[in-house]
Amino acid sequence: MTGSPFTTEHDDLRARVRHWVDEELLPHVDEWEAADLFPDEVFHRAGELGFLGLSVPVEDGGQGWDYWATVVFLEEISRASGSIAMGLGVQTDMCTPQIRQFGTAEQIEQYLKPAYRGEKIGSVGITEPDVGSDVASIRTHAKPTADGWVINGSKMYITNGVRADWVTMVVRTAEQDRSAPSAGMSLFLVDTDLPGFSVSKKLDKLGMRSSDTALLFLDDVHLPADALLGTEHEGFKQLMWGLQGERLAGGLLALGGAQMMFDQLLEDAGVRAGAGTGSLRSQRLRDRIAELATDLEANRRLIYDCCDKWNQGVYARTEIAMVKLAAAQLASKIADESMQLQAGNGHRAGDARESAWRDARLHRIGGGSDEVQRQVISRMMGL
Ligand SMILES: Cc1cc2nc3c(=O)[nH]c(=O)nc-3n(C[C@H](O)[C@H](O)[C@H](O)COP(=O)(O)OP(=O)(O)OC[C@H]3O[C@@H](n4cnc5c(N)ncnc54)[C@H](O)[C@@H]3O)c2cc1C
């Protein structure tokens, strides 16, 4: 890719998102982290400002931009906090794309459009208390009834799960067949106000503290027939289709977090040096900053190349896995290096540096762990 992919319109969009982050989010982030929840109003306001569904056609309730607008949004929102970026990222790129791709006109009206307006909050339910990476082994199941389905089971670590209006959920609709373990699953849109649906626990976490994460319980939850999303028993394939976009967005959020920590490091280095300590003017610091800048640039080129392909409708699975793996590792590396370089100051509690360090670690776990990405890459290489 040669030249910048961003037009002056993208630059204007970036300025608008940045203004929102600076004026309405950053002043409250510490308070929301301490309270373990950022308010629902953040979703509503993002919708009101036209920042949700940026790359989605207008007829589906989106803003009709190309994918670079999503890149702008995810990069800028990462400057607010990892938690806010993750909550909004789930809304825009994780629980909604399957509805646009596989949903009926009614489902688009009922879920997708209100989600992009910021009126409904969504979540995605894959992980279970005993099943994470090995999605084919999920146990939550739906049985057909005369007029729909009845679901039983539970879902674990669900982002936005405490406040969500619905969950885009993968469940088993046929017994697992050992010769085709991923067959017999289906996607459903599960309203959270149905009898039998409960948030059995809001989970405490190391990082992403102001993003709510829930353990959900489904006890004989009756769903209407039209809650099925897409084709019965094709849920795994539909989920995997959605996971590509989720992982690319996850890579962008990790890179956004890495850039935010790097900018903070530069600022801190400047402030300390200006204050006359002298230590941060050392060659050692300059060397480390130069290395991190190189890592960031290499990472950005890889991820932008993937975004360019995505923008043209090419789902580059191997590169997306590489991007997710590399960006997640870089976020952790920069978080750790920043602390190391600032030593005692870096280890102090109670400010954005601390939460950024804690938040960075999740990128190597959520949306497919490092190990899972390595497996995808090696498999695609034919190893
Ligand atoms: C804050 C947070 C938010 C989350 N949000 C959501 C959400 O919104 N929706 C949702 O569905 N899930 C969500 N998750 C769950 C997340 O996607 C899982 O934690 C992740 O997929 C790993 O699953 P697991 O925790 O069960 O670990 P496991 O799958 O049990 O893995 C344990 C370890 O084994 C490794 N491993 C597993 N399989 C293999 C393999 N085949 N080869 C090599 N190594 C392997 C893993 O990499 C890991 O190191 C969230 C998790 C967290 C912490």
Image: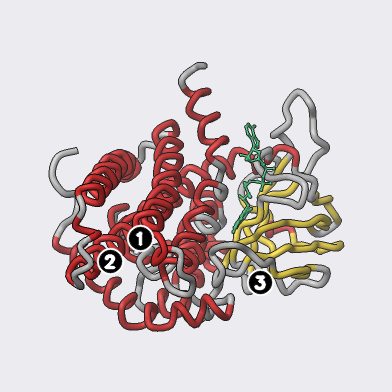
Q: Residue 256 at x, y = what percent?
A: 35, 57
Q: Quadrant of residue 136?
A: top right
Which residue is painted at 55% across and 63% down in the image? 207
Q: Dot 3 surroundings within 10 Å: few (below 14), some, or many (20 or more)?
A: many
Q: Is disc 1 placed on a helix, strand or loop?
A: helix
Residue sitting nearer the eye, 333 or 153 = 333
Q: CA distance from mark 3 to mark 1?
A: 37 Å
**In the image: residue 108, left or right of residue 67:** right
The answer to whether mark 1 and mark 2 are in CB contact below 8 A is yes
Task: Where is residue 289? Give x, y as percent.
Answer: 25, 50
Answer with mark 1 or mark 2, whichever residue precedes in sequence: 2
Amino acid under label 1? Answer: Gln
Residue 324 marker: none
Looking at the image, is mark 3 or mark 1 earlier in the sequence?
3
Amino acid bearing label 3: Val
The amino acid at mark 2 is Asp
CA gap, disc 3 and disc 2 = 36 Å
Please give the residue where the numbered disc 2 appears in the rendered image: 268
**Disc 2: residue Cβ within 8 A of ligand 1's nearest atom:** no
Tell which circle, 3 or 2, labels the residue nearer the N-terminal end. Answer: 3
Q: How many marks?
A: 3
Residue 156 in the image: state x and y as whole percent. 71, 57
Q: Which residue is mark 3?
A: 162
Give the CA distance from mark 1 to mark 2.
9 Å
Q: Which mark is residue 342?
A: 1
